[in-house]
Amino acid sequence: MRELGLTAPADLAVIGMDDIPAAAFAAPALTTINSDISGLSRHVADTVLSRLNGKTPPQHTPPAVLTVITRETT
C-alpha cells in the first residue's frame, strides 16, 4: 500500500482476520476480526453434555463468534 502511495482508509480499506496484538500498533491501526471459537466451543460442549445427561441445555445465548474491531484502516 505504501509503495503505491496509497493510504487507508482514503484509498482502500484493509481488514485483518485474527486480531493479533500488533494490529492495534500498526500504522495505521488495523481493523480486524476477532473470533471467539473457544466461547462457542464451550457453549456447544455444555449443550451436548446436558443433552447426553438428560438435562435441559443451558438457556444462555451463545457468544458472537466473529466481531469486528474497528480501527483506522476502514
Image (spheres, rainbow, N blue to C red):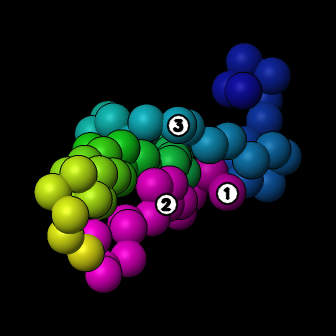
Q: Is residue 61 above or below residue 13?
A: below
Mark on residue 17? 3
Say if mark 3 contacts mark 2, CB within 8 Å: no
- Disc 3, SS: loop
- Disc 2, SS: strand
Q: Is residue 27 above or below residue 55?
A: above
Left or right of 35? Residue 11 is right
Residue at (72, 27) in percent of width and height = 1
- Given residues 46 and 50, the one toward you in this image is 50
> Which image quadrant for residue 64?
bottom left
Compare marks 1 and 2 and give the one earlier in the sequence. 2
Q: Residue furthest bottom?
A: 59
Q: Is residue 29 above or below residue 70?
A: above
Q: Which residue is mark 1?
A: 74
Q: Residues within 10 Å of mark 1 (few under 14, many from 20)?
A: some
Q: Residues within 10 Å of mark 2 (few under 14, many from 20)?
A: few
Single out the mark in the foreground, 3 or 1.
3
Amino acid beneath label 2: Thr
**Magenta residues?**
57-74
- Given residues 14 and 53, the one toward you in this image is 53
Q: Residue furthest top?
A: 3
Q: Which residue is mark 2?
A: 67
Residue at (42, 47) in percent of width and height = 35
Question: Rounded to the nearest whole Å, what is the CA distance between mark 3 and mark 2?
Answer: 10 Å
- List x then y, in percent, for residue 15: 62, 43
